Image (cartoon, grey):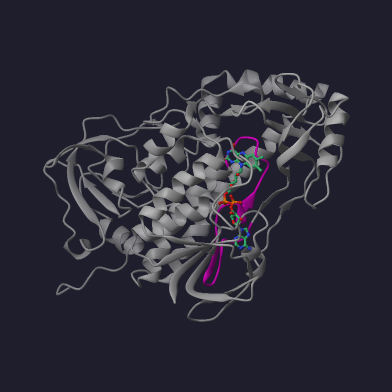
Amino acid sequence: MTDVIVVGSGPTGMMLAGELALAGIDVSIVERRSTSKLVGSRAGGFHSRTIEIFDQRGIADRFLAAGQIAQTARFGTTTLDISDFPTRHPYGLALWQDRMEPILAGWIDELGVTTQFGRDVVGLMQDETGVEVGFADGGSARAEYLVGADGGRSAIRKAAAIDFPGWDATRSNLIAEVEVVEEPPPGMRQDESGVHGLALMADGRTYRVVTTEQQIGPSTEPTLAELRDALTAVYGTDFGVHSPSWISRFTDATRQAATYRNGRVLIAGDAAHIHYPAGGQGIGLGIQDAVNLGWKLAQVVKGISTPSLLDTYTAERHPAAARALQHSMAQTVLQRSDARTAAVTATVDELMSMEEPRTKLAALIHALDVAYDLGEGHPLLGRRMPDLDLDTVEGRTRVYALMQDARPLILDLGEPARIDIPRWTDRVRLVEARSAGEWVLPVLGEVPPPSAVLIRPDGHVAWVGQGDDRGLIDALALWFGPEAPAWA
Ligand SMILES: Cc1cc2nc3c(=O)[nH]c(=O)nc-3n(C[C@H](O)[C@H](O)[C@H](O)COP(=O)(O)OP(=O)(O)OC[C@H]3O[C@@H](n4cnc5c(N)ncnc54)[C@H](O)[C@@H]3O)c2cc1C
């Protein structure tokens, strides 16, 4: 029996499998597609925190080399520039999803993850010891735990009877990659129905089309005829579109799973939350779900922690995604351009030129402000650890370089060093370091320098030392299991 089966080899499933493999878990991915190739280019990129997370695993350079850094956060018609933010990556990355996925696939391949393509999961059954999944071809597989990273229509979410409350669609868009007979006008057009545009792709022949339909389209696969009709309604011509390599429909339906866990079945990424792509937060949410869940699930599988640790996954990630979903609903409204919406957009744009609204909203879009509720205390508690330069006995380094193996980390920054954790050294890495840098967090600004920090594998701070080690043993036991016996 495999330890964990991940259903779906999109960004979320691959990241999660990578995290589990780094923790020494036997994990395999089952994927409905017959090959790894994504049809269509899909998402156009991701934001700062996602790049930071890749940096924590030592793979950010691979993505940066393939894409184009840019100020990716927009609200209304304003671009929210974060070049002054306290991060090594004060920007987003423009990189099509069909170019991003092979990079992740390359990484998990190095980590020994196997992906079985052409395996369409159609059902599951769980009992006290594991989960059995059934495939469309009649086969089955069993694992201790199962994670559905199988996208917005998640069969796993449905089979696990997890509620998916939210809001129905108020609009639908067609997106396609096609050839044309007539050259379309440059740029995007915005009208009372929404946004529309045709842009020439890098091959110099194919156009990427996005158009908002006049009525919400059906849930069936869209056709070329529907694309022609939708374009004609906006432009008075369909530009002779033909030879589609991809046609898809997306809507502004916004829904979030009531819980991300039912027993031994968990869900992550689009399987747990869907929203309109405006704002471009889908990939980042899934990557953050994956790094939040990965180490917790690994510890439960290894028997280090009890399954109740998995409930902190919903408790932390549900509110974080709920904020992003609310934001994307607001973005969606501003994409219409009747006179009243234009007035709201103008007001919002004015607000966005002010320092505090810009900073707060940009931090939300880039997910640099995520704060898990780990109780009262130092402002770092529950927030992402900044990537400070460090001096250690082994030389100069930086925080994220010490996190590439996805193990918990204590930085003892005191003079003299005071932290001693003999009963956790099998699970937690202790590094004595000095940091001359300022402790500046996005939105909050400068915070008091801690004397030590306990950093979880997802990069969030689980305990902050302020001159002594008060509370450290409790935090270690809470997150990384009880202390090992003295003879171990
Ligand atoms: C037009 C468009 C533009 C977008 N732009 C952006 C953007 O700019 N930035 C951004 O961050 N996000 C964007 N998004 C959203 C982003 O694409 C998704 O949020 C992201 O792909 C979610 O990743 P995932 O791994 O959770 O799910 P998916 O990428 O949907 O992957 C799910 C995988 O599961 C597989 N699968 C499904 N069912 C089964 C089954 N029963 N058995 C086995 N396998 C199964 C699927 O084949 C798929 O490979 C956009 C989306 C759209 C549609």
The front one of 474 and 77 is 77
Q: Position of residue 104 (x, y in %)?
A: 45, 47
| 59 displayed left or right of 394 | right
Q: Position of residue 75 (x, y in %)?
A: 62, 28
Residue visible at 19% across and 59% down in the picture: 421
| 414 displayed left or right of 138 | left
273 in magenta: yes
Residue span colored magenta: 257-281
411 in magenta: no
Query: Is residue 159 placed above or below 82 in the rendered structure?
Result: below
Quarter of the image with the C terminus in it: bottom left
Q: Position of residue 210 (x, y in %)?
A: 73, 33
* Quarter residue 164 falls in: bottom right
Total tally of numbered discs in the picture: 0
| 230 displayed left or right of 291 | right
Query: Is residue 304 placed above or below 336 in the rendered structure?
Result: below
Q: Position of residue 43 (x, y in %)?
A: 59, 39
Quarter of the image with the N terminus in it: bottom left
The front one of 77 and 145 is 145
Q: Is residue 371 visible?
A: no
Residue visible at 51% across and 56% down in the picture: 13
Q: Main secondary structure of the magenta part?
A: loop
Q: Is residue 304 visible?
A: yes
